[in-house]
Each structure stands twice: as C-alpha cells, then as structure tokens.
C-alpha cells in the first residue's frame, strides 16, 4: 500500500452531534481516527437554519457524553447556542476534526474502506457515517406545477418573516418545524398550514414528568420490543411528534389549518378535500431525505436509510451509522440519544478489532 495514503482505524463522516459523540467514544477507546466535516466550521449546519429556531428538547437532554449542556433545566437553547456547544465539545476532548472536507465516495477495499475526499484518499478499517438526516430537502413532485409567480422555499431556506414578500403564505407540513414557522409568520400575514399534525407531547409532560417520559422513549420505545418496533414503523410514515408547540397555539394565532396538499389546480396549491388556495408564498416543511448513493454497495430501505443492526450494516462489515432516525430508539435522532448509539457502535468496532478483523493501525 502507498505509504503516503493516510490510514486510520476509523474515519467518521460528519461533525454534528452524532459524529462528535462517536469521536468521544473512539478517543476513550484509544483508536486512531479522524472526523471529516464538509462545513467550514463545526456547528454551521445549525447556524444556517431559521433565526428563531430553538431546540425541540430541553437543555437537560441536549448534552453529549462527558459534557452537559450549559443551560438551566427545562429551557430550550437557541440554534446558535447549540452550535457553539458543539465547537466547545470538540475542543474539550481534543477531537481530530477536519473542517471544509468534502467526501465524494466510500468503497470497500481488501483491508477495509477507501474514503475519497477533496483532500485525497483515506484508508480506514471502519467507517462511521454520521451524516445527519437533513441531506436533501424533500419536496413533492407536484410543486413543479405551481405558478411561476409563487415563491417556493424549503424550510431549510427560510430565515425570517421579513424575507417573505407580502401576501398569503402556505406552509406545507404540520410537524414541529412547519408549525413553528407558521406561528411566526402569522404575526405579519395570513398564514395557512396544510397537513395532518403529528401527535403532540404536552409541555407538562416534558417539564414535570420529563425524566419518566425520557426514560420511556429512550429505554422502552426501542427496536428490542414489539411496541418500539410498531412505533418505529409509524415514525417513518408520519414523522416525529409535536414538541413545545400545539395545534391550539396555531388556532390562537389565526393560522388557518387545511387538509394535506395533494395537487396543483390552475397553478395554485390544492388539497385532499378538493379545495385550492391562492397564495404568494409556499414554504415546504416536508422534511428531508438522506443522500447515500456515494457509499458503494449500500442497499437502502423505502425511507432512504439502510437497514442496520443498531447502526451496523450487515452487508458491509465495518460500516456503521450513527444519528439515523429511530436507529435503535425514539431518541436516536435526538441529541440526547446520540451518545448511547455511538457508544454501542464503537463497542462493535472494538469487538472486531479484538477478533483481529482488522488489527489497529500502528
């Protein structure tokens, strides 16, 4: 093998909460690893989201292994506060993060994996993909039929109400992100929201029964039991529950609730009940889909993710994921669940190493 090629026990793809949690466990295990991040700065994925965004979980569940989030219990940190926390976390544990590195491909080799990047090829015995769930905006195909005069934005492009032109706004998607954007916009213009809201977790549950509720979604709703597997199936169909906001909040703010967006009629959005609305702006709060076609030989499920065993990909030994929605439990896609899943994956890598498949890099 070319001696100039950089070799690692593990290459971690992504320096968000999942990738940094993996780095924490890898560091404690004494493995040689590197974390590759495409953005110029750790936390930029959070900084780029809309101005008023706050985390959906309270501060006591927003920390990563070894470092609690520095905020009072039952408060909701801002996106920038959490981005700064991620930077501080990487510094605290001296994690080897390389920013501004684009990963173009991952392929299997005789000794593990070749990771092709904008800075050359890295060889790794194991790869942890912590690429996050927000790779590609998911927008209905019917959107292409809307009138050219309608401004269309995905929620990832929305920043603040003052950027939106005068006129009625339709938010498509009634999950937490869509509901929060609609609530903010309703203060300055007539706002519609289309879609069936996901079930809501009432504030008192999070504030006063928070520890019990967290224990339930973290330890009971897992893929180890039938109830967890049932919830997981519904989760992939309908999405995460409403947190910190309710349908009543929308009603009080004057947001007009509409059925699911289903088609385009005369260039305007139309809905399941056969009605349509004339609007100036449509914001697609319709979620994201992963982009994983750059991993050679990886099979994907109908919802765009690989089928794994708590993050391990059986068909490609040595390839792992951390941070997938409901990877193991309902908390897998939340900040507070990343540490446990990352620890499990690193334990699996150590087990492979002890078995001699492969030996650690010298």
Image: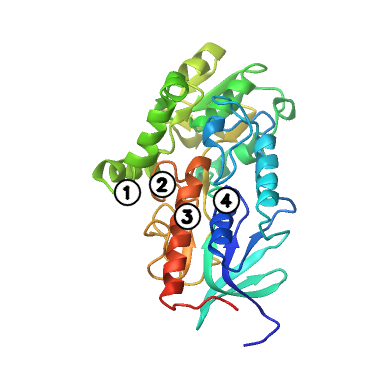
Residue 283 visible, this angle: yes
Q: Nearer the viewer, mark 2 or mark 4?
A: 2
* Image label count: 4
Q: CA distance from mark 4 to mark 1?
A: 26 Å
- Please, what secondary structure does the residue beneath circle 3 have? helix
> How busy is the neighbourhood of tag 3: few (under 14 within 10 Å), some, or many (20 plus)?
some
Dots 4 and 1: beta carbons under 8 Å? no
Position of 226 with respect to 108 (left or right) is left
- Label 4 SS: strand
Residue farthest toward the bottom in the current orientation of the protein: 1
Residue wearing tag 2: 326
Q: Classify 184 as above or below 92.
A: above
Which sits in the foreground, 300 or 74? 74
Report which quarter residue 307 is drawn in: bottom left
Q: Which residue is mark 1?
A: 223
Q: Earlier in the sequence, mark 1 or mark 3?
A: 1
Which comes before the other along the chain, label 2 or label 4?
A: 4
The quadrant the C terminus occupies is bottom right
Question: Which residue shows up at 32% across the image and 49% down it?
Answer: 223
Q: Nearer the viewer, mark 1 or mark 3?
A: 3
Task: Please determine whether, in this image, residue 22 is positioned above or below residue 219.
Answer: below
Which residue is label 4 attached to?
136
Give me the C-alpha separation between circle 1 and circle 3: 17 Å
Q: Are marks 1 and 2 in contact (CB under 8 Å)?
A: yes
């Amino acid at each position: 093998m070319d001696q100039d090629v950089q070799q690692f026990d593990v290459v971690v793809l992504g320096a968000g909460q999942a990738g940094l949690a993996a780095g924490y466990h890898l560091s404690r295990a004494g493995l040689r690893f590197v974390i590759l991040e495409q953005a110029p700065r750790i936390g930029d994925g959070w900084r780029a989201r809309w101005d008023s965004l706050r985390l959906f979980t309270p501060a006591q569940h927003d920390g990563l292994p070894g470092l609690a989030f520095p905020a009072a219990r039952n408060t909701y940190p801002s996106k920038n506060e959490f981005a700064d926390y991620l930077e501080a976390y990487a510094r605290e544990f001296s994690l080897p993060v390389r920013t501004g590195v684009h990963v173009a491909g991952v392929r299997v080799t005789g000794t593990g994996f070749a990771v092709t990047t904008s800075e050359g090829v890295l060889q790794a015995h194991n790869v942890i993909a912590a690429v996050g769930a927000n790779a590609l905006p998911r927008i209905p195909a019917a959107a292409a039929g809307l009138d050219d005069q309608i401004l269309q934005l995905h929620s990832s492009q929305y920043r603040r109400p003052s950027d939106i032109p005068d006129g009625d706004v339709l938010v498509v998607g009634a999950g937490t992100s869509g509901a929060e954007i609609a609530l903010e916009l309703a203060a300055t213009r007539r706002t519609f929201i289309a879609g069936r809201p996901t079930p809501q977790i009432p504030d008192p549950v999070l504030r006063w029964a928070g520890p019990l509720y967290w224990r339930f979604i973290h330890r009971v709703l897992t893929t180890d039991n039938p109830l967890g597997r049932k919830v997981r199936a519904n989760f992939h169909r309908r999405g995460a529950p409403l947190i910190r906001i309710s349908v009543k909040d929308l009603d009080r703010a004057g947001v007009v609730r509409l059925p699911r967006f289903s088609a385009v009629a005369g260039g305007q959005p139309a809905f399941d009940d056969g009605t349509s609305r004339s609007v100036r702006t449509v914001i697609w709060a319709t979620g994201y889909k992963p982009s994983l076609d750059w991993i050679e030989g990886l099979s994907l499920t109908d919802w765009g993710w690989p089928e794994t065993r708590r993050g391990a990909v059986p068909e490609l030994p040595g390839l792992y994921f951390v941070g997938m929605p409901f990877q193991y439990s309902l908390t897998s896609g939340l900040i507070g669940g990343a540490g446990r899943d990352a620890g499990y994956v690193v334990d699996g890598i150590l087990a492979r190493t002890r078995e001699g498949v492969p030996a650690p890099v010298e």
